[in-house]
Image: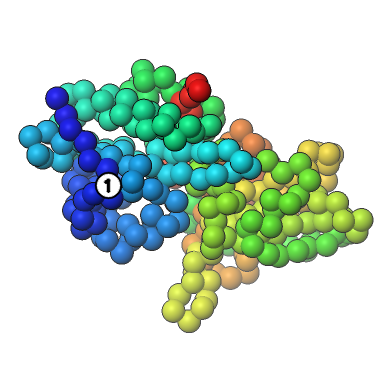
């Protein structure tokens, strides 16, 4: 029998220690210190009062972290991380954690409950499937290792380019918020947008991205998070718009910049095609899953 505590009831330093111990031996290294953890809390809208730690005989043995956002009037919850100490894996802890977490989602009257799991983490994916989660897509993480100057002249000759904050895409006619949590415009408080418009003011395409800077303010990293075109565009115009957005976002003439893409495959056909053409390589893939909450 396990007992549970909410994360806000535990000292932050202890929460971070539990996080690191439970993710020991994970597929990717996501060990953090307190400073990085606090930044992640803010960036991913994680809620400590709605995140839980499981205990066995007063020993913390696993946890589920939760993110909460309200999007277009709907309450969205996200599994921001589930992990169990190595010596407790395979003993039913994950099943009990998910059951406890789903009960919290229902108390919140959540409309959508999603998560992402790394392809290859078969045990976790099987657990989520067994607990009722359904697949709804796949997210690919690309990286660009070898720099080459891919800058070109404008692909579209008759357009207006507007740069702004990520949330500015919310006003675009027909815009739908992306499902994977990490790609949602409402969570990109430090994100930027580029919107291509026709002279008549109709949007042709947009890109959402995040930049990293060094101490002098120089761009040292760029991650593209959404690159989409208006569904009313023909295929040729959509491809040209995508190429132009890639040019605008990635600053190809600059050499010492790390470039990456997070792409929701089901809605990013052009971005995925251009990623391959531009020399990006897949670093990681994740399955996207949703729990069918009934009210």
160 over 185 or under it: above or below: below
x and y percentages locating residue 241 in the rendered image: 77, 51
**Along the line of sight, the residue nearer the viewer: 149 or 234:** 234
On-image quarter of the N terminus:
top left
Q: Specify whether 285 is left or right of 121.
A: right
248 over 50 or under it: above or below: below
The color scheme shown is: rainbow
Q: Specify whether 114 is left or right of 59.
A: right
Is residue 60 at least partly visible in the picture?
A: yes
Which residue occupies the extreme right position in the image? 200
Is residue 287 at least partly visible in the picture?
A: no
x and y percentages locating residue 14 in the rendered image: 18, 53
- Residue pointed to by mark 1: 7
Q: Residue at x 15, y 41 (%)?
A: 60
Q: Specify whether 186 is left or right of 103.
A: right
Q: Residue at x 67, y 53 (%)?
A: 207
Determine which quarter of the picture holds residue 87: top left
Which residue occupies the extreme bottom position in the image? 216
Which residue occupies the extreme left position in the image? 57
Q: Residue at x 28, y 24 (%)?
A: 95
**Along the line of sight, the residue nearer the viewer: 158 or 53:** 53
x and y percentages locating residue 91 in the rendered image: 17, 24
At label 1, counting other C-alpha atoms closer than 10 Å, the crowd grade (few under 14, some 14-19, many 20 or more) is: many
Q: Residue at x 21, y 36 (%)?
A: 4
């Amino acid at each position: 029998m396990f007992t549970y505590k909410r994360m806000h009831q535990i000292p932050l330093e202890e929460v971070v220690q539990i996080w690191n111990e439970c993710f020991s031996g994970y597929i990717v290294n996501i060990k953090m210190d307190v400073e990085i953890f606090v930044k992640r809390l803010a960036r991913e809208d994680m809620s400590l009062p709605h995140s839980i730690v499981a205990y066995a005989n007063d020993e913390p043995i696993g946890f589920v972290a939760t993110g909460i956002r309200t999007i277009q009037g709907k309450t969205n919850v996200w599994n921001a991380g589930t992990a169990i100490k190595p010596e407790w894996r395979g003993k039913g802890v994950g099943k009990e954690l998910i059951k406890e977490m789903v009960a919290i989602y229902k108390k919140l009257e959540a409309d959508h409950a999603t998560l992402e799991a790394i392809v290859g983490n078969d045990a976790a994916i099987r657990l989520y499937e067994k607990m009722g989660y359904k697949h709804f897509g796949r997210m690919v993480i690309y990286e660009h290792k070898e720099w080459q100057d891919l800058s070109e002249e404008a692909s579209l000759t008759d357009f207006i380019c507007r740069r702004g904050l990520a949330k500015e895409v919310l006003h675009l006619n027909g815009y739908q918020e992306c499902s994977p949590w990490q790609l949602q415009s409402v969570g990109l408080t430090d994100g930027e947008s580029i919107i291509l418009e026709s002279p008549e003011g109709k949007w042709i395409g947009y890109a959402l991205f995040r930049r990293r800077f060094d101490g002098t303010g120089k761009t040292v990293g760029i991650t593209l998070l959404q690159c989409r075109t208006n569904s009313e565009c023909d295929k040729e115009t959509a491809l040209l718009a995508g190429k132009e957005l890639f040019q605008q976002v990635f600053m190809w003439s600059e050499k010492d910049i790390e470039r990456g893409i997070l792409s929701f495959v089901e809605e990013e056909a052009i971005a995925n095609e251009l990623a391959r053409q531009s020399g990006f390589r897949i670093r990681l893939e994740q399955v996207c899953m949703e729990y069918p909450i009934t009210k």
